[in-house]
Image: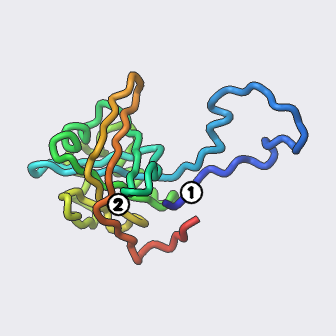
Amino acid sequence: MTNSGGAEPNSQSVPPLGTPARDAPASDAMMYFPRGVYIITAEHEGDRSGIRVLTAHQCAEEPVLLAVAARKGHSIEPLIRDSHHFALCVVDPDDRLLSHKFPQGGEPVGGGDPFDSIPHEVLASGAPVPTRCIAAFDCEVVRHFDLEADHEIYVGQILKTKIYQNSAAKPV
C-alpha cells in the first residue's frame, strides 16, 4: 500500500541519537505511524455509502488481508455487515472533492447517495469506487471486531485491485 500523504515525523521533533528516551503522550508517538487518506465504500440492495477512514494497512500476506478502522455509527455499517464486502479507496490527499463528499465520522454531505454526482464504477463485490481515486481494493470481510471504542475494525481479503491511470500520485 502507498503512504499517500502520510504524515512524516517533523525532523525538529526527533531527538538526536543518544538522547535518553522520555515519556510522551500517545498522540505524540502516533505521528510515527504512516497515515493516508482512505475511503471505505459498500453497497447492499441498492443502498450505497462511503466514509473517510484514518487508518488502513496490510495485515497478512497469505492470503493478502487489509485491516481498516472505521468510526462507529455510520450508515456504512449495515451495508458492510449485510453484503460482507467493502472497497478501500486510496485518495490523493490534495483531492478536496472526495474529502468533502466523504467526511470522516459524518454522513455524506447533503445526505443521500454521495455517488450520484461523482464519476464512479462498481467493482465485482458491488462496492462503488470513485474513478478519481488512486487505487482501490475490492475486499470480502473475513473478520469484524466491534471494539469498546469509537471505531471498529474490518479485516478484508483482497479479491481484486485497481490502479487508476488518472492519478499522478506515485507509490511510496
Q: For numbered disc 2, what is the local secondary structure?
A: strand
Question: Which of the two labelled residues, at mark 2 and mark 1, occupies the earlier sequence position?
Answer: 1
Q: Give the Cα distance between marks 2 and 1.
A: 18 Å
Tag count: 2
Q: Residues within 10 Å of mark 1 (few under 14, many from 20)?
A: some
Dot in front, 2 or 1: 2
Q: Residue at x 20, y 58 (%)?
A: 125
Give, as a three-letter code, the residue at label 2.
Phe
Say whether residue 12 is left or right of residue 121: right
Instruction: Residue at the far right: name it.
Output: 18
Instruction: Residue at the far bottom: name it.
Output: 165
Q: Residue at x 62, y 37 (%)?
A: 30
Q: Quadrant of the C terminus?
A: bottom right
Above or below, comparing residue 133 to residue 14 in the picture: below
Q: Which residue is mark 1?
A: 5
Q: Nearer the viewer, residue 34 or 61?
A: 61
User: Could you say where residue 165 lies in the image, as x and y percent from the top left?
Assistant: 41, 77
Residue 137, numbered label: 2
User: Could you say where residue 160 lies in the image, as x and y percent from the top left?
Assistant: 30, 65
